[in-house]
Structure formats: structure tokens, C-alpha cells
Image: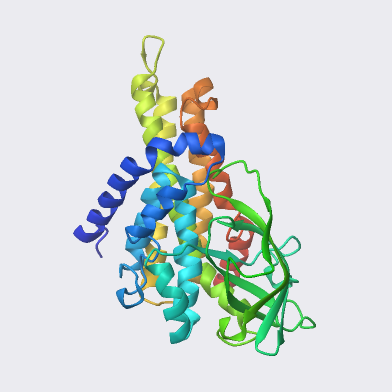
Amino acid sequence: MNFELSEDHKLIKQYVRDFAEAEIAPTTAERDRKSECPTEIIKKCGEMGYFGMFIPEEYGGAGMDYLSYVLAIEEFARVDASVAVILSVTNSLAAYSIFKFGNEDQKQKFLVPLASGKKLGGYMLTEAGAGSDAGSLRATAILKGDNYVINGSKMFITSGLMADTFIVFAKTDPEAKSGRGISAFVVDAKAKGLSVSKKENKLGIRSSDTCEMVFEDCEIPKENLLGEEGDGFKMALHILDGGRVGISAQANGISTAALENAIKYANERKQFNRTIGSFQAIQFKLADMATKLEAARLLMIQAAWKKQNEMKCTKECAMSKVFSSESCTWITNQAVQIFGGYGYMNEYPVERLMRDAKITELYEGTSEVQRIVISRNIMK
């Protein structure tokens, strides 16, 4: 058993870190304050192959393994969690959905532009009345002739303003029970009848736009159906396994930044004629922060390894997500505590990191949902 990253993985981490530090970090704080989308940065990320990191080269992707992808997301999140989640949704939800469940025509038409960086992806599952209970969604997609007509609304859609291509889940059998009669579709953002009704004003990840989207008699060709009718809910659960590892990587990246900032501050800040890092109270905080982060990272690597080797990994993905996200909230809170009053001011980045951390416990399955998934798997 080898716990050391390969030289290739180390190079990928360093390459992404250098890019993020040079191209993203200089504007992170300003974009957060203004709630401004990183349009040009995301465009550059697409040009550099970060939209289809683990998609094979034959479909326009970078052809990396899944571990390389999560290590890259971690490095993006260390600098800007908003950029990280935009890339995570495009990779592990949008592009992966088409790669896993699309036919060859759909891969050529929709996946290649996504994976090659020409188009940005989004994912529409959540509704106002269907959050953790995603199976109870009410949006409908009714086949009429050669088109499906979609009606309904979707909530909390990442990149609602920026994305070009969405994966959309809707009921093709409105009378079916919860979790049944749901199908998945590929929908162009410019489709007539699809619109953004509201951009949300959020606590954190403020430079990633999150929107409510509305379908009003939105017609899409029946060829845009992913997989078979009625298989959408099973597909969504499978897709979310990978998405949860991406959120683990985001959480771990935020935690890394918080720990690094806390260590630096502890070694510089003086009280009582000595650095605060010389006090055992601060040393123990840093020790616990580092231990939680290391454990979270190992869970993430295990889940990614199982995912890339096409092994059953639902339990591992849920464990990684719940532990990484809750550790992230705790670690960033401790970082603010170490900074004291300064930590509460936006002069330092730890207040932003604390705000960005909380969402990792909520989206792509709350911590409570992860515990349901884990308990079901261990009690079988």
C-alpha cells in the first residue's frame, strides 16, 4: 500500500496551484465583495482543459484520471471556492452525465463542446419542494410529437447565468410515485421557454451565480433524452456519487487555505511579548485542524480511487463528503478564532473561507442525507 501521490499527480497539483495563484487569486476577494461572476477566468479555464478533466481525449477532454480531477478541484478551492464549484459542476455533474448515459450522437453533439472548454455545464435537479427529497420533484416533460415540452421551476442552480448546457430532471410520468417516472434531458440554455427568474444573494461562494430557473412550455427535441424514460432518478443518484467527491475536494481546498493562513498568522501575531503560536492553546487548535484535514483528504482519495476504478463507492463518497464538509466548517471557524477580532474583518481571507465553508455541508446532499446513505449501506 502506497500513500504517496505519484509524480504525475504531484505535477498536476503544482500546475493547477501555480495557475490559480497567478490567474485567480488576485481578484478573489474583490469578486466576493461584488458578487461578480468570474467570466474571463472561467473562459480561460475552459481553454486550458479544466471543463472535461477526466473525460477521454476522444470526446475533447483532458483524459486525466479521477484522482487528478479531485486534486485539481482542491487546488482551485484553496484559492477560490466559487471557481472550484463552477468547474466541479461542469465536470462531475454535466459532462459526466452525458459521458456515462449519453449515446454516441449525444456525446458528439453535447459532450465534446463541454469537455473541450467551448461550453459551460449546469445541472438542474433541486426544486422548491424537492431538496433532500429529490424524488418528489414536480417539473414535467411531456412528449408531444417529436418534442418534449418542459414546465416547472428549478432552484439553487449553479452557473444559471453562465452555463450553456444543462442536465435537467423532470417527470415524464406525472402520476408516478415519488422517485419514479423521472427522466433526464440535455437542454440548451438558449432554448425558448427557459429563463432565469432570480439570482440568489448568498452567504458564501458569492462569485458563483446561483439561480432559480423557470421552464414555460420549453420544447426540446426528443433526441435530447438521456438514457431511457423513467431512469432519471437512478441516474441522478449515480451521478451525485461523483459530485460529492468534487464537493469533498472543494471543502478540503477551503480547509487547506484556512490552515495555511492560521499557521502564518500564529507565527507572526504577538501578544504578551511572544507569538501566539507559542501558546499551547493555539498549537492544539492547529494540530486538530491539520489532523481533521489529513483524515478528510484520505477519505477523498479513497473515494476518488474507487470511482476511477469503477468500483461501488456510494458509501465512500458519502463518508468523504460529510467528513470533509463538516471538518471544513470546523477548521475555518477555528481559523477565525485564531485571528481573533481581525478574523471577523474582510481585511483577512479567513472570514470569506468561513462563509464559503458552510455550503459544502448543504449542496449535493446535506450532511443528514449523507448519514442516511452511509447507514443504509453499512446496515445491509
Counting from the top left corner in percent of width and height, residue 327 is at 50, 46
Q: Position of residue 234 (x, y in %)?
A: 59, 79
93 lies above or below 250:
below
Which residue is situated farthest in the top direction here? Answer: 273
- The residue shown at (54%, 51%) is 360
Q: Quadrant of the N terminus?
A: bottom left
Name the residue nearer the viewer: 175 or 139: 139
Foreground residue among 53 and 285: 53
Q: What's the residue at 64%, 54% (across, down)? A: 211
Q: Quadrant of residue 304?
A: bottom left
**Depth check: 162 or 167 in front?**
162
Horizontal side, residue 350 vs residue 67: left or right: right
The number of numbered discs placed on residues in the rendered structure image is 0
Q: Specify the color scheme.
A: rainbow
Q: Is residue 196 left or right of residue 11?
A: right
Q: Position of residue 220 (x, y in %)?
A: 63, 78
Looking at this view, name the residue that lies furthest to the right: 175
Q: Residue furthest bottom?
A: 145
Q: Position of residue 19 (x, y in %)?
A: 30, 47
Tell me if I can see residue 288 in this picture: no
Q: Is residue 91 above or below residue 42?
A: below
Give me the residue at 27% from left, 58% from top.
3
Pick the quarter of the image with the C terminus. bottom right
Taking the image as shown, residue 306 lies to the left or right of residue 185, namely left
Displayed quadrant of residue 228 = bottom right
Name the residue located 41 percent from the left edge and 31 percent from the top edge: 262
